[in-house]
Image (spheres, rainbow, N blue to C red):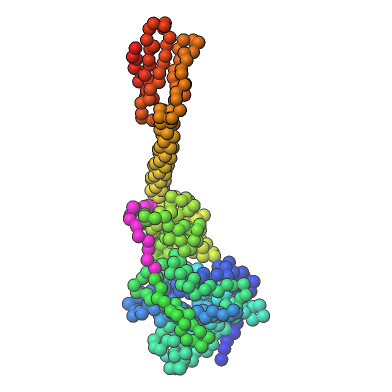
Amino acid sequence: MVSSRKLQYADRVAIQQADQAIRKDVMRALVEIITNANDSYSRLEDVGGSSSGEMIIEVLRRHKNSIIRVRDFAEGMTDARMDKVVGTYGEATSGIKEDKHVRGMWGRGLKDSIFGLGYGYVRSFKGANFYACSLLVKKGIPTFDLNDPIRATVDLREEYGIPQGNGTIIEIIVSRTDVKMPQFNNLRNYLQRHFELRPIMSNPKRKIVLREITATGKIRQEHVLSYKAPMGEEVLNERIKITGFPASVKLKVFRSGIQLSTRGEEGDYADGGLLVISHATVISLTMLKFENDPYAGYFYGTMQCDYLHDLLKNDEPVLTATRDGINWTHPFAKALKLAVENALEPLINAEREHAIHDEQTKLDKKLRQKINRALHELNSIASTELRDTREGGEPRKQIEIPESGMGFFPEKLFVQTGQIATLILRVARNENQKQTLLLASSQAMWKWRF
């Protein structure tokens, strides 16, 4: 038997909220689902339970109604849990209220992920039973359908890929025509590099498998996903107190040898910037006021501030409603931002000065090379002209003394840089005396002979 009821919030708000949160973006939906599965593994590990840490993401690309499935082997859910987690909007169901270190801080990621792309199903094995529910849009109305539990048979386990133990399968049908399904290789790249998934992708206790499947369920290709941080040198490792609050932030900054991509260039997939982390949960990627500063592009690292969880437990609006990260207008967020910016500023200013000096050095070197080339060409011309003057085949014309009684010969002379050339100054004193000769160099060294 299936119990069906209207989802507990206004129809219009449901779809609008899904659009605002997911923005018709498959990646944003997958981030929510993958982190939900990771939360489930974290809760198991916190109580000492065994955990495989494996998640399998299956993608069937179609022209219409593509399918996305995410399977984990973690806690599983009962029908009562499904009713609370899937059928209710805005509940704090992830464990943050109980101080569990999980990411699901907004209490509505799963619903938004499904309705933001189309419709979907949640199926789970828990103990000896199989539980299932669906989120559908019936005549424009978002609806939650909860099935009665049934025995978890071998056939059911084989059908859904959980041969034993507990686990959950989220299946989304991408029915919305305005949602674009990424190419498989692009999806692989995006999942590995998305800033919110980096701790999961780099966690040795997790194994994330991405599969492309055919319409018959056969595996076309699969890859184990992982993430490695850029190579860099640690330039700052400091704990900073936040003025006016009983809190601190652990700031760790690295400098890469090459400029990294920024949020302005690659958005959520940028390699540069600081990950804002609270209790192992990545909340945001930012460089604060240096977001668009090119000299900040060499830096990456983390801002660890667990006080954010305390604020969230008290329902403080320190995060944006659409899950874009920190609400920087919140008083604590403002103080946190200022403290970190003050610590970063000397690093970025030093990088700027270093870069300007390097640019000036390069400019001076290029300018000197241009000047040397120009001098070389001029000297070559001068040398040729001098040879033509001294060694030319044409007989020299008889030089006459100017009416003033004094004159330089030759009247024009090309002087090569660094060489000595002779100028003759003839002065008519009287007919019986020798002419006076003046020898001049290009370096303004004068000699007289009579």
At a point 47% along the width and 15% down the height, the residue shown is 400
At a point 33% along the width and 55% down the height, the residue shown is 234
Q: Is residue 2 above or below residue 257?
A: below
Q: Is residue 167 above or below residue 113?
A: below
State whether residue 406 appears in this view. yes
At a point 38% along the width and 16% down the height, the residue shown is 438
Horizontally, residue 266 falls left or right of residue 307, namely: right
Residue 143 at x, y = what percent? Answer: 60, 80
Q: For the C terminus, which image quadrant? A: top left
Does the magenta portion include 238?
A: yes
Q: Is residue 228 above or below residue 342?
A: below
**In the image shown, does 238 or 243 lie closer to the viewer?**
238
Q: Which residues are magenta?
A: 227-245
Which residue is most to the right? 139
Residue 61 at x, y = what percent? Answer: 54, 79
Residue 354 at x, y = what percent? Answer: 38, 45
